[in-house]
Amino acid sequence: MTLVVKAKQRLGAFALDAAFTSECGITALFGRSGSGKTSMIRIIAGLARPDDGQVILDGEVVTDTDRRIFVAKHRRKFGYVFQEARLFPHLSVRHNLSYGRWFAKAAGPAESLDRIVALLGIENLLERRPEKLSGGEKQRVAIGRALLSAPRLLLMDEPLAALDDARKAEVMPYLERLRDEMDIPIVYVSHSITEVARLANQVVVMQDGKVEAVGSALDVLSHPPASFERRDAGALLEGKVESVDARHCIATIALKSAQLRVPGAMLTLGKAVRVRIPSRDVMLAMREPEALSALNILKGTVQNMTQADDATVDVLIDCGGDIILSRITSFSAERLGVCIGAPVFAVIKTVALEQ
Ligand SMILES: Nc1ncnc2c1ncn2[C@@H]1O[C@H](COP(=O)(O)OP(=O)(O)OP(=O)(O)O)[C@@H](O)[C@H]1O
């Protein structure tokens, strides 16, 4: 599946001028509030016409301003999930789901209700009305309803933004299953680095109506573009659970060549996981530190250094093919003599497991 989007649109004082191509899996549209993510998704959905642009899914043109093609939104057979679940309050969960299916009849073979219900873990909710569901449960039903309409593409606009952290954590594994088990491409709008780090295969970073960076999640997040909130900068790495020390609740994750220890006794051996290491949580040492409480100290070589406005330096460290980012003050960089090519030790204070 390939989605090609090119769009120019003037919205009051705001000018959208963005283009990207995405392949299968989850493509995250990521960026600050007002960067143009929703405007972009509205154009893909057919909820808005660009002044100039194209939307092409797998070779089928659904918008082309030059050729005056604009397929109406209900004929695009795209599914939508919004921030609010928007379920019918007077219908049970089962009937809300059937509503999605009813649309699918025109669209082609529908996914089996049982499969979707099991995928989203909503078996026990089928007879309930939406008012008796938690926010996370409502959102899972909304996703189920969208999937049952047999969409060719699923558009999700901040689907977790209205949920608290506990509900977000509840829904996230279902989104992962959706990504891994359903053959439906997803465009996922978010301004949460945690969601993007955990879910996205590809990331399109939006800034002031333009695409600032595009690429695999691992690449884009580990080489953060200028617009990234500085607190969001960090490395995203993939690895496998190599061993679990149940007594100490510590798992060892094997990366390309480095190993990381992370808290977590419940992990399955061999499971593929992602870890995110915020750059502000990585200190540098020029000699191997001893007797530290930090679980992870990686040896590497400085590959690049970028000076920021606030008297800090982002240091890119190559640890045998695993790239770690460290943010230190310019003062520390000078005092330690950190320079490109220097051997260093990265002392990692926290590792977030995005399993
Ligand atoms: N119909 C409109 N008329 C005028 N300005 C608009 C219109 N729609 C959107 N805008 C402006 O376009 C800009 C981009 O809005 P958009 O909703 O696409 O951003 P976003 O990245 O999705 O933001 P958020 O994360 O806050 O939802 C904003 O400055 C918004 O005020």
Image (cartoon, rainbow, N blue to C red):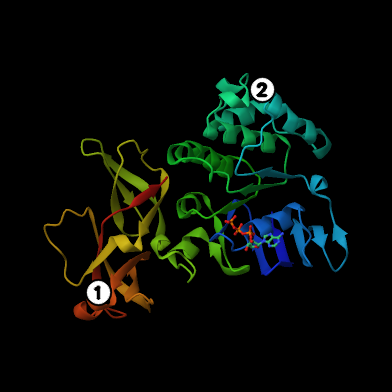
| Mark 1 residue type | Pro
Circle 2 packing at 10 Å, graded few (<14), some (14-19), many (20+), is some
Quarter of the image with the C terminus in it:
top left
Quarter of the image with the N terminus in it:
bottom right
- Distance between the alpha carbons at the discs numbered 2 and 1: 62 Å
Disc 2 versus disc 1: nearer the observer: 2
Q: Determine which of the numbered discs, if any, sits on residue 343 in the image.
A: 1
* Position of residue 326 measured from the top left corner of the image (x, y, whole percent): 32, 67
Query: Is residue 230 visible from the viewing direction of this image?
Result: yes
Residue occupying the point 39% across, 55% down: 276
* Position of residue 36 measured from the top left corner of the image (x, y, whole percent): 63, 62
- Disc 2 under 8 Å from ligand 1? The reply is no
* Position of residue 176 measured from the top left corner of the image (x, y, whole percent): 52, 42
> Which residue does the numbered mark 2 point to in the structure image?
92
| Mark 2 residue type | Ser
Quadrant hosting residue 243: top left
